[in-house]
Amino acid sequence: NPSNKTSLESPDLSLEILNKTQQLIDLGNPSKRPSPSKRPSLFRSPSQ
């Protein structure tokens, strides 16, 4: 499993991929996740 080896070698990369995927989910489905408390300043309210 190359995915397991990648996660072991670069856990930060895996987390980054998960974060980006979650961001895409938040952007694509705002109704499912109405409260982006994890990272609201990235694309929700950059002025704040």
Image: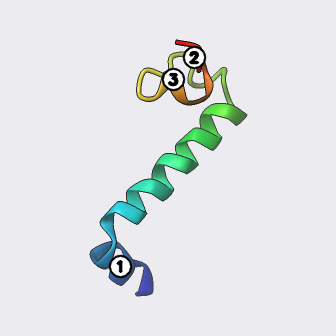
Q: Which residue is mark 3?
A: 41
Q: For the residue labelled by badge 2, is the local secondary structure a helix, a strand or a loop?
A: loop
Q: Position of residue 11 (x, y in %)?
A: 31, 66
Residue 9, above or below 11 = below
Q: Which residue is mark 2?
A: 34
Q: Earlier in the sequence, mark 2 or mark 3?
A: 2
Q: Earlier in the sequence, mark 1 or mark 3?
A: 1
Give the Cα distance between marks 1 and 2.
32 Å
Residue 18, above or below 46 = below
Q: Residue furthest right?
A: 28
Q: What colour-coding does the image apply?
A: rainbow
Tell me the amino acid under the disc marked 3: Ser
Circle 3 packing at 10 Å, graded few (<14), some (14-19), many (20+), is few
Do the residues bearing badges 1 and 2 touch, measured as CB atoms within 8 Å?
Answer: no
- Asked if residue 43 lies left or right of residue 38, the reply is right
Do the residues bearing badges 2 and 3 touch, measured as CB atoms within 8 Å?
Answer: no
Give the Cα distance between marks 2 and 3.
14 Å
- Asked if residue 5 lies left or right of residue 16, the reply is left
For marks 2 and 3, give the one nearer the viewer. 3
Q: Position of residue 12 (x, y in %)?
A: 34, 61
Residue 4: which disc? Answer: 1
Give the Cα distance between marks 1 and 3.
31 Å
Residue 18: which disc? Answer: none
Q: Position of residue 29 (x, y in %)?
A: 68, 30
